[in-house]
Image: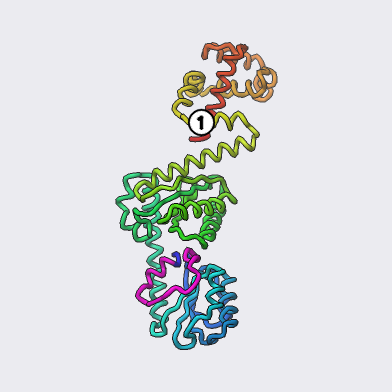
Amino acid sequence: MYVWKLLKKLKNFNITLSAGEKGLNRTVRWYHIAEDTSVADFIIGNEIIFTTGIELGEDTDKIIEFIDALYKHGISGIIFNCGKYINHIPPQVIDYCNEKSLPLFEIPWTEKLVNVGKAVSTALLEDERFIANMQNAVNIALLIPTRSKANKALFNEYGFTDGKFYAIAAGDISTLSKEAAGELANNVRNSLVNITSCVFITVLEKKLIVIAAHTNPNVLENEIDLILKTLNKFTLCGRSKINQGIRNLNKYYKQAEENLISNKILANCALNRDKQCEILFEIKDKAKINEYCSNIIGPLIALDNRNGSNYFKTLKCYFKNNGSVLKTSQEMNIHRNTINYKIKKIETLLGIDLSNLEERFSIMLAIKLKDIYDDQQ
């Protein structure tokens, strides 16, 4: 559960934010009541800390030392029960928490921490069920355009309202183990500490999906780029445009998916130093690419599909070896007479002469375009 969401759940306890507003996107997994630094060894990470300050008083140095020890163990925020041992949070403490983007809250002494603790534990347990429902709703909305409206109440509760602007980032996790994908998700969550967008992370179709929403499109533009920088450290990714409204999540997801595919192809082109690939990829009309490939090499692919033959593979290998029958036969481990037979049959089937430079170029272009097009499927 994010700190900002937990704060909403505790609105009846008169809790006020005093510092660390930029850290409201930290996640909370549990809470502790602590009065000195000895509890630091028991901090797992992502806990929120309650304290009365009985051991601290209003000694600025002691308070900062106390908070710093807990901060280094990964706490999500700290709540001071003010009114008896601490009346006012010193300005230096406020500055420290703002610098660390660590949320610091004050709660009146009249509020009993035992009651707040019960409310926190209840909120965290309820949020686990909510997130499971939210994850299902988000995944359905990403795949089925008509379902976003059906889950409007759930989205609104999370903060995904129709008036906000949205952007989606998609990272390729198809080659990552389950553990590595989980680590990537955690790294992305940790990168959210200093952003103000409402964010949801899910896994769909072998991609890690990050949905970000904000009322300000310029802020969202900057913050989705920060998320992409984190994703790019671990895997290839793509993103959608900045879009307004929650109803078309499927459309935004498709934008991110297409951008991811483009980036994967360009990365492959760069890896292979294939300048032709980069130029041909600028042809964006997939329908025309498909039509051209079908007209030029379609009959050959259809023959292979019907008979389980490998004529198309033979032709690609033949071109790869600059028309050398010997090298093609060696690479495919097939007798050169068989290669000659296959090349003649290919020429007959496609009605071409591979010794003709123009016809040869048309075939090679179709093969190259098909390779690029197939990589986008």
Instruction: Residue 271: say if magenta.
Output: no
Q: Residue at x 37, y 48 (%)?
A: 141
> How far from the left and from the top, in percent, is residue 351?
52, 11
Q: Residue at x 35, y 44 (%)?
A: 144
Specify few, some or many for label 1: CA neighbours under 10 Å numbering under 14, 14-19, or 20 or more: some
Q: Is residue 38 above or below residue 129?
A: below
Q: Pick whichever, 86 or 139, lies toward us.
A: 86
> How far from the left and from the top, in percent, is residue 26?
49, 65
Q: Name the amino acid, label 1.
A: Tyr
Q: Is residue 41 visible?
A: no
Q: Left or right: 201 with respect to 55?
A: left
Q: Say which quarter of the image contains residue 251.
A: top left
Q: Is residue 280 above or below residue 347?
A: below
Q: Residue at x 64, y 34 (%)?
A: 272
Q: Is residue 299 above or below residue 236?
A: above
Identify the residue under disc 1: 373
- Which region shows up in magenta? 4-26
